[in-house]
Amino acid sequence: ETGVTQSPTHLIKTRGQQVTLRCSSQSGHNTVSWYQQALGQGPQFIFQYYREEENGRGNFPPRFSGLQFPNYSSELNVNALELDDSALYLCASSSGPGSYEQYFGPGTRLTVT
Amino acid sequence: GENVEQHPSTLSVQEGDSAVIKCTYSDSASNYFPWYKQELGKRPQLIIDIRSNVGEKKDQRIAVTLNKTAKHFSLHITETQPEDSAVYFCAALIGMGGGADGLTFGKGTHLIIQP
């Protein structure tokens, strides 16, 4: 198992609400990427944080936003939740420039009703 | 952006036989190709990866081959065992010196090992 942790494990929200998901990176890793995995699909890249700044973004709207803290942990915030946001949200940590290996956390299962 | 195609979507093999999963990618700038194994309800687990300056890499029963000209790469599992049953994802990444972009994943292959 990797040292990447995520909280909470499961979450149920209502359409229109806002949610915050949390990720702690593996020791020594300073880069965190977030992915959305819909049922039966591969993970889709949302964005990446490096040195507390967004370092790349996939095809997701601005209501998906994030933060990275000085200890390299990270948050994913989703505003105005839609039913299609129901998915497994995974974070992955890596050790930064020149090291491409990404190690995933266990994920947060978000259900929007 | 990058696009990764993965085949087959389901693969059933007899225990002890070999399994091969194939992926193609669209962006010739991609230079890193990992494979992940995901068991039901668990996180994707990195099992092997290859960089574009290498044509083949092996780790015990698992090997990955890369053909940069044709833009395809494959996962080979020999002497399959029941615990190899899972969904396997290939991915591609355009790695840059100042940081890396996100991984682009294929849709996954459900590997079933028949006893």
Image (tube, coloured by chain):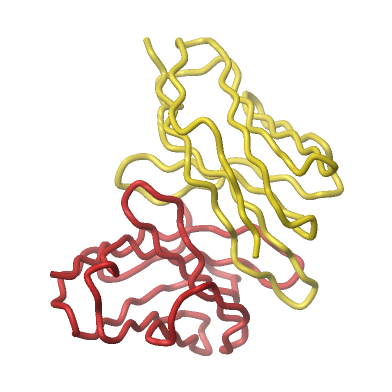
Chain colours: A red, B yellow
Q: Is residue B97 left or right of residue B78?
A: right
| Residue drawn at 52 percent across, 81 percent down | A72
Q: Position of residue B11 (x, y in %)?
A: 46, 24
Q: Position of residue A92 (x, y in %)?
A: 50, 64
| Residue drawn at 45 percent across, 51 percent down | A42
| Residue drawn at 26 percent across, 62 percent down | A109
Q: Foreground: B21 or A26? A: B21
Q: Quadrant of residue B114?
A: top left
- Residue A8 vertical placement versus B4 (above, below): below
| Residue drawn at 55 percent across, 47 percent down | B46
Q: Position of residue B94 (x, y in %)?
A: 72, 63
- Residue B91 vertical placement versus B22 (above, below): below
Q: Is residue B36 left or right of residue A17?
A: right
Q: Quadrant of residue B47?
A: top right
Q: Foreground: A55 or A93? A: A55
Q: Foreground: A31 or A63? A: A63
Q: Foreground: B22 or A75? A: B22
Q: Quadrant of the C terminus of chain A?
A: bottom left
Give the tally of numbered discs. 0
Q: Quadrant of residue B111?
A: top left
- Residue A22 vertical placement versus B48 (above, below): below
Q: Position of residue B24 (x, y in %)?
A: 67, 42
